[in-house]
Amino acid sequence: GLWRRNGNGLNDQVLNYAEPPFCRAMRDADLLLVQFGMLGRTQNQTRDLHRPTSDVGVCFVIHLMLHRLGLFDFCGLAKAPNSDINLYLDEVQQGFYQAEYNSEDAMSDDFLLPWTYSAAKDASSFLLLLEEFLHTVIIMASELPPVPPGDREGHTSQAKWRLRREVVHRLASGPKTHSELAEVHHVLSHWDNVYLSEEGKLVNPDDATGAALGVVLSEVATRKISRAKMEPDKWQLNRSVWEEYDPSFFHISLRHHQTAAESRPVPD
């Protein structure tokens, strides 16, 4: 049909949507937009001054995700319109919700109650969708936009923290070469890299970006000398830094999280 010509390109986007470094321009941008959307939605906001102004936005997004993924019925949640049909119809008339309409081929003009469609056909498919739903909620709640820095020093401090976090989680899935770790700069913002380069010039003016990464590596990892002549040295995460590992960190894949869980040292 119309979209067949874009099918292969769309498949590539789906595969790379959440994978670094492409996630910065796709998944991360979408999440940031949804987070700001939750804060900005004030329709039907309660007048209770003791409740946060974002509660309507959060409820709306959670409710929308449950419906879009087709999980509302699977989770055993009761639909409010079914419990009080008259109140639902009255609120539809007031414009609180969009009305449900019969198809043009329907023989009856009776109203329709809201319903949920799901592409899942068995319990295992529903569980996969539920897992994705919970993972997305965790990311939206934990990966919040940082407070805007007030000056260059504040932005540099945030950039160094984000670089350290990326490096720690890359190393949590196993030892990495310096070139592999240098790829973390692709998931950092332009201004983060600018301030990190300025900071790196104080250490090594000839390789400012590499110097900033080197400072972090000296703090969190140990260099393992390769025994093979043609094999590069690798960096291994220090045992004392494992407490910074976050099992829900969204810039490494599920496979890497599984590897990290197996490699995590046992507490003393």
Image (spheres, helix red, strand yellow):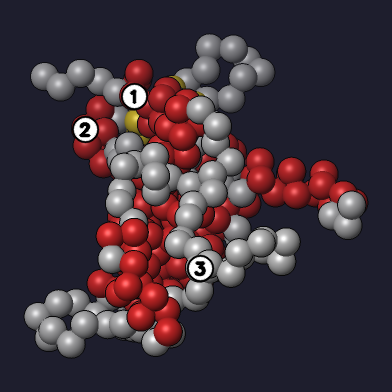
Count neighbours of disc 1 (C-alpha within 10 A) and say few if under 14, some if 14 to 19, many if 20 or more: some
Q: How far from the left and from the top, in percent, is residue 81?
A: 35, 64
Instruction: From the viewer's side, name the closer residue of 119 and 32.
Output: 119
Task: Say the numbered circle drawn on residue 41.
Answer: none
Q: Which corner quadrant of the image does residue 168 belong to?
A: top left
Please state which amino acid type lies under the numbered disc 3: Phe
Count neighbours of disc 3 (C-alpha within 10 A) and say few if under 14, some if 14 to 19, many if 20 or more: few
Q: CA distance from mark 1 to mark 2?
A: 16 Å
Q: CA distance from mark 3 to mark 2?
A: 63 Å
Residue 153 at least partly seen: no
Q: Secondary structure at mark 1?
A: helix
Please state which amino acid type lies under the numbered disc 1: Ala
Give the residue number, with chain letter if any, for mark 3: 111
Q: Secondary structure at mark 2?
A: helix
Q: Residue at the spot x=48%, y=55% of the render?
A: 115
Q: Secondary structure at mark 3?
A: loop
Q: Residue at the spot x=39%, y=44% of the render?
A: 73
Q: Quadrant of the C terminus?
A: top left
Instruction: From the viewer's side, name the closer residue of 156 and 210.
Output: 156
